[in-house]
Amino acid sequence: MTYVIDGIESAMAQAKAAAGDKDVQVRGAYTAQRALEAGVLDEVQIHQIPVLLGDGRRLFDVLPSQIELEIIRVIDTPEATHIRYSVRR
């Protein structure tokens, strides 16, 4: 694990360099929001479960502007619906 303190753009660049041809994943609402805001996130994957928690950080509550997504894949199971989007630029 590497901690990066000079911004999301730097963190993503370092992660992509370290990953080579593999995918880089971002976890957590705050980091995802910053990556979307900076334009360094290519895809978003949502796992919707049939439970409403009513607490925690909202994933899409604090975005600087409208961000358009395109559905890549939907997998529906009894336990969750998994939706994968590409971020339109």
Image (cartoon, helix red, strand yellow):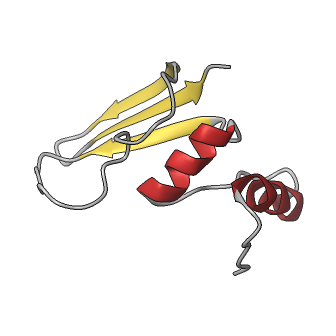
Residue located 58% across and 27% down the image:
86
Image quadrant in which the C terminus is located: top right
- Residue farthest along the front direction in this orientation: 64
Percent position of residue 87, x then y: 59, 27
- Residue located 46% across and 36% down the image: 63
Instruction: Indicate the quadrant where residue 78 lies.
Output: top left
Whether residue 34 sits left or right of residue 83 in the image: it is: right
* Quarter of the picture holding the N terminus: bottom right
Q: Locate residue 12, reporting x and y percent.
A: 75, 55
In the displayed structure, 55 sits above or below 68; it is below
Q: How many numbered dots are placed on residues in this image?
A: 0
Residue 18 falls left or right of residue 77: right
Q: Residue at x 73, y 79 (%)?
A: 2
Residue under the point 50% across and 26% down: 65
Residue 59, above or below 75: below
| Rendering coords of residue 8 (x, y %) | 69, 56
Q: Left or right: where does residue 6 sit relative to residue 57?
A: right
